[in-house]
Image (cartoon, rainbow, N blue to C red):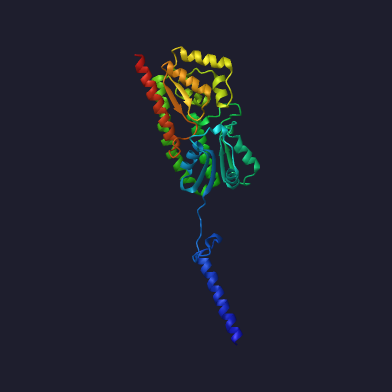
Amino acid sequence: MKHTTYIVIGVAILIAIVSFIAIKGYHPSSFGTNNNSIAINTTKTIQIVAAENFWGSLVSQIGGTHVQVLSIVSDPNADPHEYESNTENARAFAMADYIIVNGAGYDSWANKLIGAGVKSDCKILNVAELLGKKEGDNPHLWYDPNYVNLTVKQMKEDLIYIDPANAAYYEQNYTNLQLSLSKYQNKTTEIKKQFGGMKVAATESIFAYLANATGLELVSPPAFTQAVAEGNDPPAESIVQFETQLKSGNVSVLVYNKQTVTPITNNMKKLATEEGIPLIGITETIQPPNISFQDWMNSELISLQNTLNAKALGKK
């Protein structure tokens, strides 16, 4: 009799436990050593790794609260071309749901980490491939407003593919981002109307896309600017040609990369100063690192516009 009673009580307890779990829900991660509650985690946080912080800033604005973004290259005092990956980077790539690389040879270290192994369902965006660029082309793609627009559109579509349940959220954030980006992109049009055709020089190819967008004539020898961007010594004839241009009196400003400093670029800056040519420093990664991509771009364009304006007034 007692045995039968124990069985009935045991079954009742089991039924109660099963009913409780069915009502409250169960998720293995909800149990911890000091956790007496049961909860369900229905929100998926997409783990994103961006090789550089300019792409990381943009994707984080589209993904909002549904993503966690790690930007690898973000040190304002380092040359991104010389970055070397580490084990922490490899671990981040291996665990990512979405990886964004610049491509075109700019971040070959990232391609090596991808080749070393990522999740089978990891989505990868190679910006250069998206834009039809290859190694050897100018890799500073984020300085072209049209390329930025194409890239953020692809980011939005990729996030929707990964997390279709939140498609409307990503669409709204994408619309908001487009509106925000238009501020700096309208500034390029404004500069083009004011100063289109003015001759400018740059110590490397980082400024080429933006010079084109603003309608400025970049007169620096391509052989010089490309060599500096790739960390090589420019050909001797390109150095002579560059010096001649700076001495001609036709160059309005000299743009230089704050993150790529070499003896030859310092010499060109010194010569420009001696010739009365104002200097404008721009950067490869977002500076300061805690501001948005569009605020960074807008601040650089304001600096360019103000300098060109001052130069134009000085000539009158």
Q: How many labels does the image show?
A: 0
Observer-nearest residue: 141 or 89? 89
Vertically, is 53 above or below 198?
Answer: below
Observer-nearest residue: 158 or 246? 246
Residue 73 picture location, percent across and down? 53, 38
Residue 76 picture location, percent across and down? 48, 35
Residue 153 picture location, percent across and down? 50, 37
At horizontal 53% and vertical 66% (from top left) the residue drawn is 22
Toward the right, the furthest residue is: 116
Question: Where does the C terminus fall, quadrant-wise?
Answer: top left
Residue 152, visible in the rendered structure? no
Vertically, is 264 above or below 127?
Answer: above
Residue 284, visible in the rendered structure? yes
At horizontal 51% and vertical 23% (from top left) the residue drawn is 265
Vertically, is 9 above or below 235?
Answer: below
Quadrant in the picture for residue 84? top right
Going by the image, does 94 lie left or right of 297?
Answer: right
At horizontal 41% and vertical 21% (from top left) the residue drawn is 278
Residue 5 picture location, percent across and down? 58, 84
Going by the image, does 212 lie left or right of 86?
Answer: left
